Amino acid sequence: MVEEIKKLKEKLNITIAAHYYEKKEVFELADLTGDSLALAKKTANINNPLIFCGVKFMGESAKILNPNIDVYMPKLADCSMARMAKENLVENNIQLLKENNIDFIPITYINSTAKTKAIVAKEGGLTCTSSNSKKIIEWALSQNKKVFFLPDKNLGTNTAIKLGVKSKIIGEVGWQEADIICFDGHCSVHQLFMPEHIDFYRERYPDIKIAVHPECSPEVVAKADFAGSTSQILEYVKSHKNEKIAIGTEINFVNWIKENINPNIYILSSTKPECPSMNETTLKDLYNLLKSIDEGKGYNKIEVEKDIAKNAKKALERMMELS
Ligand code: 13P
Ligand code: SF4
């Protein structure tokens, strides 16, 4: 199947992009890889059809930033965090902020639907990713505004701690006084990492390093040696080549790092932190899609409604300009 996929890809002149959390066999066939920001940048600059192996907001962002190419996804798997920020909830929260006379800039994590990004853009806001949240939020605060951050309360809170400013979840006692007001969303995978897991490893291996994704809880991030996006975790591992490192993020990526970069890697969990959405795409799905495109059909072609795409693009481009 791998050979067939390579042949079809070549014949159809198709680019394959894959996020680090994809299954190993899918990830290894990709032409473009990276964290969310890198993938958005890389896929914005191609001219040929694209197959995006990842979750839906990634395929949507690629199509919005590069509307003239065909973007397909082997599976339309949705990120559970993106789904948490239902558009009516986002609008209700924005309404509440306005009723409380809060002067704010909304910032949505790229892990959100195109509709949410469009709502945010219409309110003068923009997107960010886990690799540039500090820069983007810092910029918004420098405009003497508060920030409404969505959907991930953990990324919002962790960035607030980094910047030394106050954050609260919208509706919590005293939320109006916070500099960063967070929507109450989270990642179902990264919530699995616990501070006790860090204690466990530190007790056994006093010299171990702990690297986590900033979607983990602030308690976990506080105990870790490093927190960063997937690409930043990869850089961290490369710069600590011969050290033991326990990593708190999706297991496919951790296994890939262990196999390819540093064998002394541990998964920071007593469970299997697997993202069900990222794991939906199989080699067979990729093959079936290529075969269907070759037969002149194709499916799961990403289309974003014109008005939503226009506004969501503004939110993404504002981020690109700043990062
Ligand atoms: P990165 O931007 O770090 O790749 O993260 C994407 C993601 O979905 C993490 O759960
Ligand atoms: Fe979404 Fe979490 Fe999966 Fe990342 S790991 S795609 S945030 S559900």
Image (cartoon, rainbow, N blue to C red):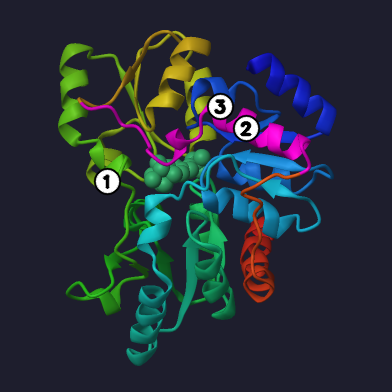
Measure the alpha-carbon separation of dots 3 and 2. Answer: 6 Å
Q: Give how far apart the Cα atoms at labels 2 and 1 are.
A: 38 Å
From the viewer's perspective, is residue 190 above or below residue 254? Answer: below
Q: Quadrant of ligand 2?
A: top left
Looking at numbered disc 3 in the image, what kind of residue is underneath it? Lys
**Which quadrant would residue 34 be assigned to in this image?**
top right
For label 2, the residue is 288
Q: Nearer the viewer, mark 1 or mark 3?
A: 3
> Given contact means CB atoms under 8 Å apart, are the residues at marks 1 and 3 in contact?
no
Label 3 SS: helix
Q: Which residues are magenta?
A: 271-296
- Check disc 3 and report the residue beneath it: 284
Task: Residue 138: give x, y in percent of width and height.
Answer: 51, 61
If the image is split into quadrants, where does the N terminus sit?
top right
Answer above or below: position of 188 versus 25.
below
Residue at 64% over, 54% down: 302
Residue 315, horizontal then vertical, whole percent: 61, 67
Closer to us: 229 or 186 = 186
In contact (CB < 8 Å): disc 2 and disc 1: no
Image position, residue 29 (x, y; %) = 65, 23
Q: Which residue is painted at 30% across and 16% down in the image?
A: 208
Task: Inspect this view and state whether residue 214 appears.
Answer: no
The tag on residue 319 is none
Residue 312 in the figure: left or right of residue 246: right
Give the amino acid type for the residue marked by disc 2 in the picture. Asn
Residue under label 1: 217
Task: Work out whether 99 lies above or below 132.
Answer: below
Assess whether mark 2 and mark 3 are in contact (beta carbons under 8 angstroms). Answer: yes
Q: Inspect the magenta stretch and tell me whether residue 194 lies in it.
A: no
Does residue 103 appear in this view? yes
- Callout 1: SS: loop
